[in-house]
Image: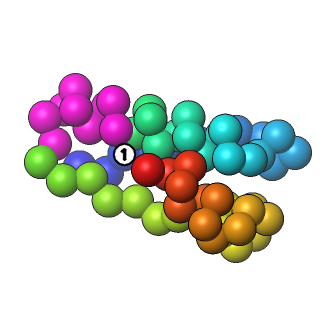
Amino acid sequence: RVLLVGLGERERFGTEAVRRAAAAAAARARELSASHLATIVHGGGAGGLSPASAAQATV
């Protein structure tokens, strides 16, 4: 299965958007009884977040 989660509007993108997206993905994976969940660190590149901030917001 593949789950896509939106990050919202570009102008409003930040660590909170990353947190919300990661939480939504984790909750849905739990509902689906997924045994694995993989993601990338959102915002570490074009999003303008530092890699550390993006990673911290993801987990």
> SS at mark 1?
loop
Colour scheme of the picture: rainbow
* Vertical arrangement, residue 44 with respect to residue 28, above or below: below
**Residue 41 appears left or right of 38:** right
Q: Quadrant of residue 50?
A: bottom right
**Residue 59 appears left or right of 33:** right
- Residue 26 percent coordinates (x, y): 34, 38
Q: Say which residue label 1 marks.
A: 3
Q: Quadrant of residue 19?
A: top right
* Of 37 and 19, the residue lying toward us: 19
Q: Which residue is farthest top?
A: 31
Rendered residue at 18%/53% (across/down): 36
Amino acid beneath label 1: Leu
Residue 42 visible in the current orientation: no
**Residue 14 appears left or right of 42:** right
Task: Give yes or no for residue 28 being in the magenta stretch.
Answer: yes
- Residue 42 percent coordinates (x, y): 59, 60
Residue 18 visible in the current orientation: yes
Label 1 neighbour load within 10 Å: few <14, some 14-19, many 20+: few
**Residue 26 appears left or right of 15:** left
* Vertical arrangement, residue 7 with respect to residue 45, above or below: above
Q: Quadrant of residue 44?
A: bottom right
- Residue 1 percent coordinates (x, y): 23, 49
* Vertical arrangement, residue 45 with respect to residue 49, above or below: below
* Vertical arrangement, residue 9 with respect to residue 43, above or below: above
Rendered residue at 32%/31% (across/down): 28
Per the rendered image, the range of residues in magenta is 26-34
Task: Give yes or no for residue 19 being in the magenta stretch.
Answer: no
Rendered residue at 26%/38% (across/down): 29
